[in-house]
Amino acid sequence: MHVDLQGPWSPLLGRLTLGAIPYTNPILIGTFIFAATIALIVVGTVLYFRKLPYLWREWLTTVDHKKIGVMYILVGLVMLFRGFIDGVMMRTQQVLADGPHSAGYLGAAHGYLPPYHFDQVYSAHGTIMLIFAVTPILAGLGNIIVPLQIGARDMAFPYLNAVSLWLTVAGAALVMVSLFVGDFSNAAWVGLMPLAELPYNPGVGVDYWMWALQIASIGTTFNAINIIVTIVKMRAPGMGWFRLPVFTWTMLSTNIIGLTAFPVLTVALALLGADRYLGTHFFTAGLGGNFMLYIDLFWIWGHPEVYFLMLPAFGVFSEVIPTFSEKPLFGYITMVAATFAIAGIGWSVWAHHFFTMGLAPNSIAFFSAATMLVGIPTGVKAFNWLFTMYRGRLTITTPMLWSITGIVLLLVGGLTGMMLSAPAIDYTVHNSVFVVAHFHCMVLAISAGIFSAVVYWWPKVFGFKLDERNGLAFYWAFVIGSVLVFVPMFGLGLAGETRRLDYLYDPQWMPLLIAEEVGIGFYFLSVLFFLRMLYVSLRDRVPAKGDAWETGRTLEWMTHTPVPFYNFAVTPQVHSRDELAWRRANGLEEAKPDRYVPIHMPSNTGVPVIIGLLAAAFGFGLIWRIWWLSGVSLLAIMVLVIIRSFNKNEGYILTAAEIEAMENKIETASVIAEQPKRLPLSEVEAH
Amino acid sequence: MSTHHANPLDHAEIRQGTVLRYIVAFIISALCMGAAMLAVQLKLPFLHYAALVVALTLIALLSQAALFFGLDISRAQIWKSVSLVLTVPLFIISVGLTVWAFSSLYERTMLPPSGVTQPGMSAPAVPGMGPMGAPSQPTLLQ
Ligand code: HEM
Ligand SMILES: [Cu+2]
């Protein structure tokens, strides 16, 4: 070993000892009991209803883009809940630990979390929310919707698609494991340098953060390749570039960002890994290292990353608003141009995250001006959405409410972003909770896009709508919570509260902190309403039509609801930008194909999920420096990939008769229906 | 059913290399590496050295793109070639702006080269790469 490790190390277990299990921490014991109960209920239910074979055959081994998308979203929602609990913990700590006379509980001097634990909570919160909640949910939406919108049978690389999913899951699993085995990073989601270096952070926390991020972002990069190729290569006949739905356009630009930006993160983390594992000095404070290079690399990825998350939400607004305004999107071409302008400019603004690092005035001026430029295409978009609604026939459903709210949040976040992009202002509020409030407006706009999308496209996937009444309650609780948490936060930031504090020194901040705590209470309520919305909708299951909202405009609403696993019985011919609206105007929306042709489908495979498991083991081994485990897992992954590459993987054929039968009884083809075993091509021919 | 889907090698997008191209690309890459090693040992003036490195990088990159990956402007490969070309501006933006911003950042935040050691560090600073942040140095906002 080339680096000095603190504490014991053994060849068999690496740094892992019994002391790594935090069985003395009451909070973590409670968490463990909660997690174990849920796990038992889930596993118990699966076993009781004998659904294990179904789960394996139809879900874990699937290569169907819709099922993969659903699983992405499910993982994202679980992580969203975990990140939310972290948020509750932080808010509660701050309201308890304000002022020198605030009491201390559970061994903390103030509040109930000692600094080291608090630091892990905010580091986990940021990492989880951005990388393991919002990213998978958006990836899932893209997976489900893009092929449907362009009239494709599946993604371009169905097998790679499953690999991406399971790599993301492996990363998320590592973050979760860090709760109960060892620690998580205390160096923030950005990896504060040189705090994240081994001498200053000798535990395994940073390693958990680093490898979870590394493994998941490789999955994200694969997914980006997949979506780009799908859009470039798999469009239905007639779907020219300027007939692409705007959501698909935003997915294209977002994944171009993903494909180009994520490798920078991979490099930054790999160099940090070299520092922590091999004893190099890329980002240390001495021996030729320079931690400012890490900050630079991180934000070269980090700023494009925030647009990687934002653009799909723009896409959702651009689908939902025309549908519920019964008008085509205003300014389609400018919308597409604005999308790419944002993505492009987003590549040259990253230094606004470290104006205060000591950059020269002319550099600061350049990056400041570039940052402000982003406001122009963003403004174009906002006006386009408004003009779409202007004189439209509006129906205010929950998806529409979420989208409108998203635009408002975008406005608040964008304007405060403009303030921050002025260096004179940034020098006074950098690293204050004003910045935190700014970017939460933005990520809340993304969340609004996500909830809008989930409610909007839910019936397409599952065949019934979500309950509107509970959906509205969820919406209002969420909005009230957001206002109560983040409006005071802007104020606290201007009053001088710096971010990431486990102890606040100024008792005068108390009223605003209490308001934030009440806000978190409303968020808690919103979670309950969300669960109730799911429960009521699953219980009632009122069937929805193919065009579930009756004013849909794009291709995905032309298939059945729920969408059959082969998407379109016959590949559609596209005539217009809003194909369904065009067909409706021409009285063609009920047209049925006069005959069916056999469909060639990819076969399921267990390789991706096994690769995911091995990747998690590989990461776990590296984190605890159990070298044999990492070595064996990596070798196994390589061998699996090579074996798989010899498999001709011919897929199977759905016959015309089978398709016709399923088209007439569409539940039998839905994503949750169990399919009979279908033989791969070569075996069919052998018979 | 035709099984042409089943054989990946029937697709032009997938058939990228030939044995000959692989061998040629391998030789070129090896030559580039050898030249790079020589360049290090020759102790050339900095500008010549930099120009040589850039030239070798370009040759290696081109030979790999064209020979290993078979990128060209045919219908099957054009998208891959386009995406490779499109990374060039990003590369220039991210590396160029970094170099530009950091060249003045160094002057403003780093010590001039000298033998100063940082308090608390056992190893002496590497000449030419001063450690950060000695309190006596006027730095920010001068
Ligand atoms: C009009 C567009 C925007 C402008 C002008 C803008 C400007 C800025 C500036 C100048 C900062 C640095 C503040 C500081 O640390 O002192 C910042 C931070 C941040 N912004 Fe934005 N922003 C914009 C849009 C967005 C979007 C769309 C997102 C996310 C989806 C976002 C997420 C963030 C995050 C996460 C941070 C803080 C990161 C951290 O330090 O942890 N911003 N923004
Ligand atoms: Cu930024």
Image: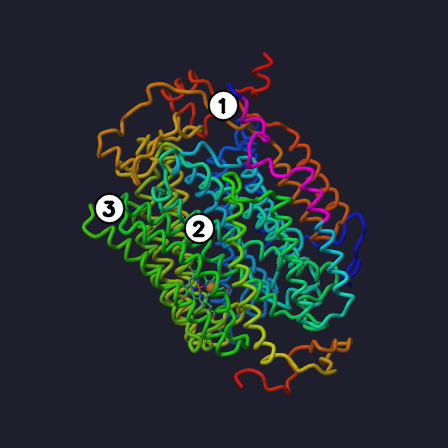
Label 2: chain letter: A
Residue labelled with disc 1: A675
**In contact (CB < 8 Å): disc 1 and disc 3:** no
Q: Which mark is first along the chain, 1 or 2?
A: 2
Q: Position of residue A89 (x, y in %)?
A: 51, 59
Is residue A580 visible in this depiction of the protein?
A: yes
A301 or A661, which lies in front? A301
2 or 1: mark nearer the eye: 2
Image position of A383 (left or right of B20): left
Which amino acid does the dot numbered 1 rest on?
Gln
Q: Which of the labelled discs sits on residue A558, or is there none?
A: none
Give the magenta part as a residue range. B3-27
Residue B6 covered by magenta stretch: yes
Residue labelled with disc 3: A325
Which amino acid does the dot numbered 2 rest on?
Ser
| Residue neighbourhood size for the residue with mark 1, other residues' Cα within 10 Å, grouped as few (<14), some (14–19), many (≥20) | some
- Mark 1–mark 3 distance (CA, rounded to whole Å): 39 Å
